[in-house]
Image (tube, helix red, strand yellow):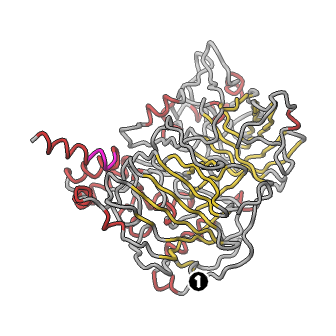
């Protein structure tokens, strides 16, 4: 996974040997979130979108119910804004997205095959993905999640925020991945959840910067490990 | 609890039973793993459960990876023409025995420590990633995802992965990488063999099926991955661990077969729940001193325990 030469190369020419846009590399995402003073993750809007009936249910849960507290894998778009690196590996028609935080992997077909019948069988933490190229942009439809939270318990964009961001089984995420230049990967997601939200929520454009590395590491979130307890693990990712 | 959680749950709740199911003491060099021929319509979990749930006699009736005849040419990548290891492989079978038993190589102090440890207190129980070669033998889905300049080892159990860059040899390790369960791996091609050099282990995992197969932070491993045909992968590890072993250990030569045409590996994350673990330990009625020693060996590595013991002896 050697470094590309020529930093002035236009994005369209960053291609794999088999002709697909090349998204490969280790990419460092920003740490985004929200406080009443600063909302870098567009959560003020998300908070407004929760349906009244969803809000009623949300009063019955608290910050400690954040699935991240149990070390379960966190899906995108939240995974893109934890401040940890991700790695993308491609081969013809298929992409693998690896996230260092909450150490997990996702297969993303890029050949436009659509969802398979098996995708609907059971929900997973990171969802089932089906991708297709729209020009140089990889558009990925992701379904069948296990009700992740869209943001963390520390994310409170208003004074009245409770820091709970649940989703339902209806969650669908449409991601757009594009390499805007050799050293920058752009990610944006539209989040739909007809049971919880009155309208789709759009994440901000998230820019991930290329790291001069060819492998992300092994970082485990272990509930019972006094060497790396989850509190210190989560602190690394600002949660 | 959903269907997907079943294997991880079984591991947590029935640690003792699960350990026996998942790591049966298989010393025979051939025909260790038996599988059915599966249609593409089955989910991965169904395959795993059918095989794991089947009693030995029933397994005997199924086709073995060992009996697989070579089939098809070795696939090659479109980007560099090297063997393409990409695929999902299940299950494992040893095709050539280890020249020397690992158990015979432990230094006396390490052997004494092994005998004091409780066999149910496993890295597995704490959701630690499998260290290969042990990881190669786990009876769950195992996938390789190969792209230009990189191969990723993915395991269904716990959803763990290891990224292995493929370089134009010789391998160079980055000394600033934090020691880990799986170590820092760098690969290079020796003809059509993918040679993986692994160092920088934290010494907290177990090396092999013979439990507790302790390792240390001095472990250095060279793995050789080959493709005998179009649907099998072959693996052998050569291991040196001078802090706890008296000599080099060569693992059995092992194979995994591609029996399903599935393209994705699903996974069960290990959701460690301290209450469940505590309950299990209570059920097992483990002596508290033995429990502490066993846990310490996992938390700090066998080498740390041995160094502490040596320091204590020295101060007396």
Q: Count residues near mark 1 (Cα–Cα under 10 Å), then give few for <14, some for 14-19, many for 20+.
A: few
With A135 as the anchor, is B59 left or right in this view?
Answer: left
Q: Is residue B211 visible?
A: yes
Query: What percent of the width, then of the height, locates residue A60?
Result: 52, 34
Report the number of discs.
Answer: 1
Q: Residue furthest top?
A: A37
Indicate whether residue A84 is drawn in magenta.
no
**Circle 1 — which element?**
loop
Q: Residue at x 55, y 74 (%)?
A: B50
**Residue nearer the viewer, A98 or A60:** A98
Q: Is residue A66 above or below residue A92?
A: above
x and y percent of residue A93 in the render? 80, 54
Relative to A10, say whether B189 is above or below.
Answer: below
In terms of secondary structure, what is the magenta stretch mainly?
Answer: helix
The chain containing the residue under callout 1 comes to: B
B145 or A172: which is nearer to us?
B145
Residue range of the region highlighted in magenta in the rendering: B301-305
Give the residue at x 45% y 48%: B181
Q: Residue B303: within the magenta?
A: yes
- Which residue is more in the foreground, B46 or B72? B72
View extreme (right): residue: A135
**x and y percentages locating residue A143 in the rendered image:** 72, 48
Which residue sits at x=49%, y=58%? B132
Residue A53 visible = no
| Horizontal and vertical percent position of residue B312 | 16, 42
Is B51 left, or right, of A196 in this rendering?
A: left
Left-right relation of B260 to A66: right
Tag 1 residue: B67
Residue A46 occupies quadrant:
top right
* Quadrant of the rendered image containing residue A83: top right
């Amino acid at each position: 996974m050697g470094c590309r030469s020529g930093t002035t190369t236009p994005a369209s020419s960053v291609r794999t040997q088999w002709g697909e846009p090349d998204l490969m590399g280790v990419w460092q995402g920003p740490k985004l979130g929200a406080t009443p003073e600063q909302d870098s993750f567009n959560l003020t809007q998300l908070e407004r979108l929760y349906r009244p009936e969803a809000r009623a249910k949300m009063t019955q849960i608290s910050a400690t119910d954040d699935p991240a507290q149990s070390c379960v894998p966190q899906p995108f778009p939240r995974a893109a804004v934890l401040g940890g690196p991700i790695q993308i590996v491609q081969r013809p028609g298929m992409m693998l997205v690896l996230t260092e935080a909450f150490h997990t992997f996702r297969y993303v077909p890029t050949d436009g095959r659509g969802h398979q019948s098996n995708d609907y069988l059971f929900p997973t933490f990171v969802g089932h993905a089906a991708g297709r190229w729209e020009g140089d942009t990889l558009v990925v439809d992701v379904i069948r999640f296990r009700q992740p939270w869209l943001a963390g318990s520390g994310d409170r964009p208003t004074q009245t925020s409770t820091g709970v961001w649940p989703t339902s089984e209806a969650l669908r995420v449409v991601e757009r991945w594009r390499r805007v230049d050799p050293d920058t990967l752009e990610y944006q997601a539209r989040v739909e959840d007809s049971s919880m939200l009155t309208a789709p929520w759009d994440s901000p454009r998230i820019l991930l910067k290329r790291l001069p590395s060819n492998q992300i590491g092994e970082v485990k979130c272990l509930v019972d490990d006094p060497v790396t307890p989850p509190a210190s693990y989560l602190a690394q990712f600002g949660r | 609890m959903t269907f997907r959680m079943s294997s991880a749950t079984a591991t947590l709740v029935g640690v003792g039973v699960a350990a026996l199911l998942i790591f049966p003491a298989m010393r025979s060099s051939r025909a260790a793993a038996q599988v059915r021929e599966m249609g593409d319509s089955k989910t991965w979990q169904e395959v795993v459960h059918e095989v794991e749930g089947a009693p030995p006699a029933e397994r005997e009736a199924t086709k073995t990876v060992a009996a697989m005849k070579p089939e098809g040419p070795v696939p090659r990548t479109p980007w560099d023409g090297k063997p393409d290891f990409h695929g999902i492989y299940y299950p494992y079978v040893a095709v050539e025995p280890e020249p020397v038993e690992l158990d015979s190589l432990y230094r006396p102090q390490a052997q004494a420590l092994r005998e004091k440890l409780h066999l149910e207190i496993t890295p597995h129980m704490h959701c630690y990633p499998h260290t290969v070669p042990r990881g190669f033998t786990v009876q769950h889905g195992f996938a390789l995802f190969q792209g230009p300049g990189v191969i990723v080892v993915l395991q269904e159990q716990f959803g763990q992965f290891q990224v292995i860059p493929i370089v134009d040899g010789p391998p160079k390790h980055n000394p600033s990488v934090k020691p880990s369960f799986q170590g820092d791996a760098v690969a290079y091609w020796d003809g059509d063999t993918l040679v993986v050099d692994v160092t920088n282990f934290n010494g907290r995992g177990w090396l092999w099926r013979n439990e507790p197969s302790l390792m240390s932070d001095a472990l250095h491993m060279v793995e050789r991955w080959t493709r005998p045909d179009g649907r099998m992968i072959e693996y052998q590890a050569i291991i040196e661990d001078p802090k706890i072993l008296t000599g080099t250990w060569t693992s059995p030569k092992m194979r995994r077969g591609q029996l399903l045409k599935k393209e994705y590996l699903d996974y069960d994350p290990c959701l460690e729940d301290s209450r469940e673990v505590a309950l299990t330990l209570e059920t097992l009625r483990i002596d508290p001193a033995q429990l502490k020693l066993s846990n310490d060996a996992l938390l700090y590595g066998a080498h740390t325990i041995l160094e502490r013991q040596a320091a204590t002896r020295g101060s007396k």
